[in-house]
Amino acid sequence: MMEEKKGYSATAKYLMIAPSKVRPVANLVRNKSYAQAVAILEAMPQKGSHLILKVLQSACANALDQNKKLDEENLVVKELQVNEGPRLKRVWPRSHGRRDILLRRMSHITVVVDEKASVRE
């Protein structure tokens, strides 16, 4: 039994931003239409919105490249994942010869776009 195709995806890995800062932005555009999602992300000041926008545009370009019959207006953000990448550990000198460890967190962002269900039938 073959699984139904999941849509068109794009991934950005090893982004120098903590996933906790990107997730609230991702929650705003999940399950929105492509045009709506782009409008929301372009209006936001956060760094995470710019990163998600780039991945979203890449996923849209992949969709239009792989399926010539698709139209930009019919695309929907089907899936948007913000996963944790590796952490860079940096030493932060403190007084009396001690140290703290500074964790620089990284993110992986995956976006899947697909056409609206009403168009498919």
Image (cartoon, rainbow, N blue to C red):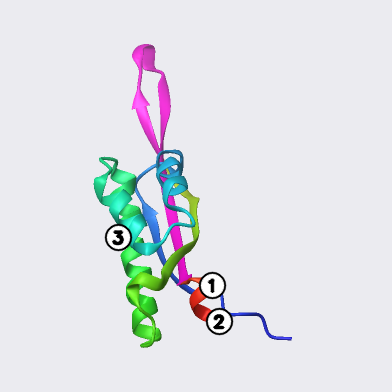
33 vs 116: above or below: above
Work out whether 19 lies above or below 15: above
- The reply to whether the C-beta atoms of the residues labelled 2 and 3 are less than 8 Å apart is no
Q: Disc 3 vs disc 1: which is toward the camera?
A: 1
Task: For the C terminus, give its image quadrant.
Answer: bottom right
Q: CA distance from mark 3 to mark 1?
A: 24 Å
Find the residue positioned furthest to the top.
Answer: 96
User: Which of the two discs, 3 and 1, labels the residue nearer the N terminus?
Assistant: 3
Which residue is rendered at x = 34% and y = 83% of the image?
A: 65
Residue 98 sits in which quadrant?
A: top left
| Nearer mark to the viewer, of 2 and 3 | 2
The residue sitting at 31% across, 50% down in the picture is 41
List x then y, in percent, for residue 80. 48, 57
Magenta range: 89-114
Instruction: Indicate the quadrant where residue 62 lies.
Output: bottom left
Q: Secondary structure at mark 3?
A: helix
Q: Main secondary structure of the magenta part?
A: strand
* Residue bearing the label numbered 3: 54
- Three-letter amino acid code at the position of disc 1: Ala
| Depth order, front residue of 70/89 | 70
Residue 74, x across and y down, in percent: 40, 72
Residue highlighted by disc 2: 121
Label 2: element kind: loop
Q: Position of residue 40 (x, y in %)?
A: 32, 49
**Which residue is located at x 74 percent, y 86 percent?**
1
Residue 33: x %, y % from top left: 41, 61
The residue indicated by pointer 1 is: 117
Q: In the image, is 9 to the left or to the right of 45?
A: right
Could you tell me how far apart the alpha carbons at marks 2 and 3 are, in whole angstroms? 30 Å
- Residues tagged 1 and 2 counted as in contact (Cβ below 8 A): yes
Q: Marks 1/2: CA distance?
A: 7 Å
Q: Magenta stretch: residue 95 in it? A: yes
